[in-house]
Amino acid sequence: MSDTDGKKPLGLRSGSQPGQVKQSFSHGRTKSVLVETKRKRVVVPKPGTGTSGAGSTGSSAAAGGSGKRPAGISDVEMERRLNALKAARARESEDAERRAAEERQREEERQRRRDEIEAKEREEREHEEFMRRKQEDEAREKAEAEARETAKNAPAEAPKPRPADAPATPAAPAAERSVGKPASGPRKADRDAERDSRTKGKGEADSRRSGKLTLTEALAGEGGRQRSMAAMKRKQERARQKALGLGAVREKQVREVQLPETIVVQELANRMAERTADVVKSLMKMGVMATMNQTIDADTAELVIEEFGHKTVRVSDADVEQVIDAVEDKPEDLQPRPPIITIMGHVDHGKTSLLDAIRKANVVSGEAGGITQHIGAYQVTTDSGAVLTFLDTPGHAAFTSMRSRGAHVTDIVVLVVAADDAVMPQTIEAINHAKAAKVPMIVAINKIDKPDADVNKVRTGLLQHEVVVEAMSGDVQDVEVSAKTGKGLPELLEAIALQAEILELRANPDRAAVGAVIEAKLDVGRGPVATVLVQNGTLKRGDIFVVGEQWGKVRALINDQGERIDEAPPSVPVEVLGLNGTPAAGDVLNVVETEAQAREIAAYREQAAKDKRAAAGAATTMEQLMAKAKADKSVSELAIVVKADVQGSAEAIVQAMEKIGNEEVRVRVLHYGVGAITETDVGLAEASGAPVIGFNVRANAPARNSANQKGVEIRYYSVIYDLVDDIKAAASGLLSNEIRERFIGYATIKEVFKVTGVGMVAGCLVTEGVARRSAGVRLLRDDVVIHEGTLKTLKRFKDEVKEVISGQECGMAFERYEDIRPGDVIEIFEREEVVRSLA
């Protein structure tokens, strides 16, 4: 077949060409062999079609006519070959590009290595050249010094003049020359010895050259290292101190080192007034490898203290709190202080409205939902000039701990009861708090202006809880008031003043301040802020204090009117700025002398709290852990992250969440805190698949972006009712639905057939109800359930049907079960799920 474009006629010429090859053998023998050279057939595409013709497809090339391609090849074959050729060329080009890229990378790597080797060799050559030049310079300087030494000694060693009567023989000069040549050896040795002795003498003298330095002396020097000016000054200073008698070794001062249970190496060195490096070295000699920032135990530290010659005074970690121990005040230092009155009662009984009427303010309008959700502290001056401090507590059931705190820091409790609602659950709780705190109580019967007000019903209801008012011959004062009209307010203030006079409240304003944290929050721009009620002493700006696990320095004091003040005497509520963290509500504030004491006390309390939590976790045995894990396996948990505006609200929400749930589902608070929602909260919620609950706070911009990216839900609330209801509804969604069965029919097996590909098929008669393909079935034999499952097939005659009604025959086959017999009964039922909810 021709290898051209196919236009030439078909001839008889073979595709092979004959030729001869001469073969050589051993012993000089040769042989000519006739061979044929065959050329490989090449398929040539249509002329004008480039090798890279992307625009022309194989089909168009194949359709160019059968006369322009090798004969006997179909269009499909031609298209396939062209496509294969293009693919091969594309692969070749890709391989070529890849090889070129790899070659470039290898070449770059080789070039980099060559550059590194050349740079290294260049540095070595430069170093060798520098050393060679240095050696040459030293040799030249040495030769010049020897030449100068020779020239200097030449006049002293010149030959003496020969006497006049001495016979002049021609051999004398030659003899002198012959004698003079070896004489240079001893002279050179003498010069070397003299130079060595001079250098040695100079070293032993250990003093600096004095006078003017000449060129000859400079060149004659050995170039050795001279002592620095600082070394000479130090030597002179030591000589001066020795002359003045100051060089005597001082006697070591023995110190009493307070040693706690554990101590940092650097702190131990500071208490001994020793160098930290010396303490570390001493520990290493004992075999203890510790750095300056590591902690060592008391026994090891005691050995170190004894080695340095000091005395050990063992102290406990709890001794750090001795600086804030209560000090008994002298009677002559005590001065009268305003009473602290806490208003308590059930929600919506008018506590805040009553306080607003006394303060002539309107706090209710600022509360979300019209209910108090924070504990507030206010100071009121009455018309008679008496100063009263009021604490307003929430009445909602979730704020139990807030009411408890208010009762424990107060002097008098005003129990507000609505005349139209009588005694309610939180009223009873407030009575119990007041009794537990052992503080006197005044009952204010509010809302007497309402038409359905029943004062006697309130007084009778209080009797059931052992609160006997004066109107019923008891010792508890009761006042009928109306916060709306102002009726009875003067009588209430008079009753409070009378009770305060009976208590004789006194405090010492000239001592270090002691107070209680009523509320704490994290304010944007101001940082941690604590509402503190000063109980004793005077809190001043600049005071250093410790409160719970936090410490700080009073940066500013703000009273209940929002004004900055310089000091807060006893019974004055103030906002304190300058804390390093948010304290817990209920913590006690104590003023200390130094910042170091405050840091130490706060660190000790924080560590003690950690140890307590760890001990609580470690106290459980393995059996208890296994039992708890087994019990929790069937319990579903709703995890949430809570952020609130103040510490008290966060605690109230956590306590409310703990009450939600039953033995199947519960709510778990992963983390709760005070302040805005941050990225850290979003990250924690994402890891646990929990929503973030914000109570009167909002998420900052980075937290919002992070929540959108990670799909974390953030919910905002301002009323605790709504929060509790929503969480309860979400927890109800975790309850497993109740499964109920509903019987829909019965069928009796009349005959059993074996069908190829299906198995055993029961010929049934539906006797009751309906048989459905999607329903569950039970197989009953002699009224005993022997199988429960689903149907594989349900047929009516030869057709697959969804259901068969009563009175009709059908064929049924069970899924993965074939032990069926005539006379068995099939029970058909459906399951339905019923949604459950928490009560």
Image (cartoon, rainbow, N blue to C red):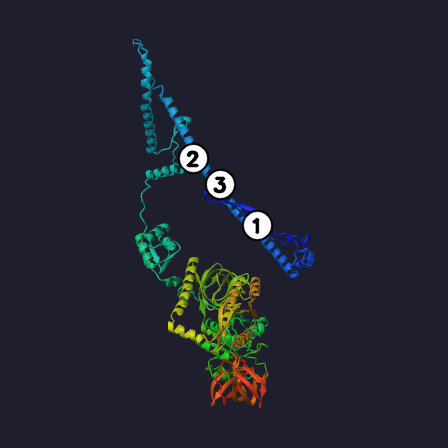
Q: Position of residue 472 (x, y in %)?
A: 48, 84
In the picture, measured across the screen, residue 22 lies left or right of residue 273, that is right
> What is the spatial separation of the Cα atoms under label 1 and label 3, in whole angstroms?
58 Å
Amino acid bearing label 1: Glu
Q: Residue at x 42, y 75 (%)?
A: 630
Query: Residue 401: in sight, yes or no?
Result: yes
Q: Position of residue 529 (x, y in %)?
A: 51, 64
- Nearer the N terminus, badge 1 or badge 2? 1
Task: Provide the secondary structure element on which disc 1 rests.
Answer: strand
Tell me the residue that label 1 is attached to.
36
Q: Position of residue 316 (x, y in %)?
A: 35, 62
In the drawing, what numbered circle is on residue 118?
Answer: 3
Q: Badge 1: few (under 14), some or many (20 or more) residues near its Cα, within 10 Å? A: few
Q: Position of residue 79 (x, y in %)?
A: 64, 59
Task: Provide the secondary structure element on which disc 3 rests.
Answer: helix
Tell me the residue that label 2 is attached to.
131
